Amino acid sequence: MLSIHASSPEKTTPNLLPARINHNGAIPSTNQYWKPENDDKGNPHVYFRGRHLHGTTLPLPENYTGVVLQMTDKTLPTQSESQSQNHESNAQEDEEEGEDETEQVEVKIAEQLGSFDEVVVWGHGGTVDEGEDVYVRGVREWIGFAEAMHVDEEGEGEGTSTG
């Protein structure tokens, strides 16, 4: 399981690039490598490592928020770790009575570094074809799947029809 802890998240815009970069981590100056501009039609474009890339902004639906997470090595204390020795003696009594204990699930902590409401998908030689691009289709299909799986207060999915 995962627990998300917000720590002054910044507003950001993720960029999906058609490139493979063998580096994880920060770089000293992003302005040296990444300076997107808008053309006269308002579409983003940039030259990245000698390639002309064209961006397509993909807004998230109104009721969705994207987050940027960083996994940590921290875990939430389990119920048995956070309670006193008194609980341990009670647990021993329960075992003697033959009751089954529930298995403790480790909960990892992720820190929320940022949030976003749109993603820019970059393509070579022109804007991304929104009907064919795998990232655009993936985001839209995932959102559709999530909405179909959502159960409202009456126990019906939002995507289901009645009657």
Image: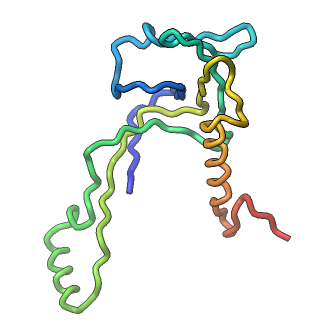
Q: In which quarter of the image is residue 158?
A: bottom right
The residue closer to the viewer here, 151 or 133, is: 133
46 lies left or right of 88: right
Above or below, 51 against 119 in this view is: above
17 lies left or right of 29: right
Query: Residue 86, how many percent across, how many down?
Result: 16, 74
Which residue corresponds to the image point at 66% horizontal and 32% vertical from the top-left?
59
The residue closer to the viewer here, 92 or 140, is: 140
The residue closer to the viewer here, 58 or 86, is: 58
Above or below, 108 against 27 in this view is: below
The residue closer to the viewer here, 5 or 21, is: 21
Q: In which quarter of the image is residue 28?
A: top left
Query: Residue 136, how many percent across, how many down?
Result: 64, 36
Q: Quadrant of residue 134?
A: top right
157 lies left or right of 74: right
Quadrant occupied by the C terminus:
bottom right
The residue most toward the bottom is: 97
Query: Residue 150, how many percent across, how many down?
Result: 63, 59
